[in-house]
Image (cartoon, grey):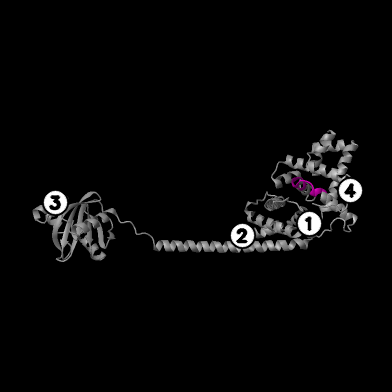
Amino acid sequence: MKCSEIEASAILWFSGELEPARKRAFDRHVSGCPACARFLEEQAALDARILAAFGEQPAGEEATPIGRRVMMRIAAERRRRLSFALAAAALVVLALTVGYRNRPPEPVARVFADAARDHRVEVIERKTRRWRTESPDVEDLAVNFGLTGDRATGLAPLGYRFARARTCGLEGRPALHLVYTDGVHEVSVYVRRGGGSGAMQTAAVDGEQLASLRAAGYEAIAVSTGSAKECAQMVRRAASML
Amino acid sequence: MPARQDEFERIALPLTRGLLGFARRLGLPNGSAEDLVQSTLLQAWRKFNQFGPETNMRAWLYRILIHLHYEQARRARRRPVTISFMETGRQAPGTGRDSRIEESLEVREALDRLPAEQRTVILLAVTEGFTCREIAEILAVPIGTVMSRMSRGRQALREELLAEPRGIGQEIR
């Protein structure tokens, strides 16, 4: 090892980070080189002067209050975070509750929307339409749906009688629109082909009650301005007669 | 959470005294040094989730402290190292100092004249006992940078302190 290398490696020698082989070479050189030995002595003396000037540690009691203050701040921060988390959780619960109460209404099935609109326009508002009222004409319409005229007119709810019929479209599919009356009120029953069976579906659209029920390869949809219960009874009776 | 708090208290708080000493050696007045140490420990707590079993807590705390110190100095737009005789309680030069105090002040003045980067590595090595590798970790610089700063700083100190003694009463920056 050369003198220039001693100067370069002295820092690692002092910090004890020289690799063993280099440390042995370092020590060997210094032991035979008065100049390098003097250099190291000066460095050591310099460190001693720095330590003497700067090395004093604060007394333990000077540090203790700092640690105490830090732990108090940490505890306060934890309490604050906990309060914040609880407040945030409460807000979430509140938002969910309010949101649930003010949730938008369930979307109405398109078949109900179409039936409600058709009933309003053709029965309540009595827009001009070509209705069939006579038995042969009704028969002609009914056969298109695999029904006889009597079966179609016989779907009347209790206390009601057949008034008129025509073909209309629900969800883009043809349906037989049958109107029944008790002399004062008029209700609609729509019949269309539709396989399978299932639970009764109900809806309310613009004050009109609607109910649908599948049976015997048909779907019956009743529309009335009466109560939901009456509407359900209407569709149940119509489906049972299909 | 309380377990982590206990762990932090057990590992970090015993290092408060050393941190306070180092903060003062950086030239901060007592109050500022205590504030810096307190900020260091609080920041360490907030980042304690990053602390793993392989982390050197002491080096980690020094790293935070130095980073905060430089940040504060940057914000104050002044050199990070200042010595205030009024605040540190030390006697000003030429006011009846004994030879030990004179010697101490001479060394402090010489160190104070060094660039902050050189003085920091020298203090970390000599008074705090960190190895070059640890200093590199604390300052987030390559070990070669640490060695070159240390070498230049030591050389400047040798020239300063091994020359004729400085006159008593010279103004300290």
Q: Nearer the viewer, residue A232 or A168?
A: A168
C-alpha gap between disc 1 and disc 2 = 41 Å
Where is the N terminus of chain A found, in terms of image quarters? top right
Residue that mark 1 sits on: B84
**Is the Cβ of the residue at disc 2 closer than 8 Å to that at disc 3?**
no
**Extreme-top residue of the structure:** A2
Residue A39 location in percent, x, y? 87, 40
Q: Is residue A218 magenta?
A: no
Task: Please tell me how crowded label 3 is: few (under 14), some (14-19), or many (20+) other residues with Cα within 10 Å.
Answer: many
Circle 3: element type: helix
* Residue in the picture at 65% in, 55% down: B43
Mark closer to the observer (3, 4): 4
Residue that mark 2 sits on: B1
Query: At label 2, which amino acid type do we have?
Result: Met
Circle 2: element type: loop
A31 displayed left or right of B37: right
Residues rendered magenta in the picture: B110-119
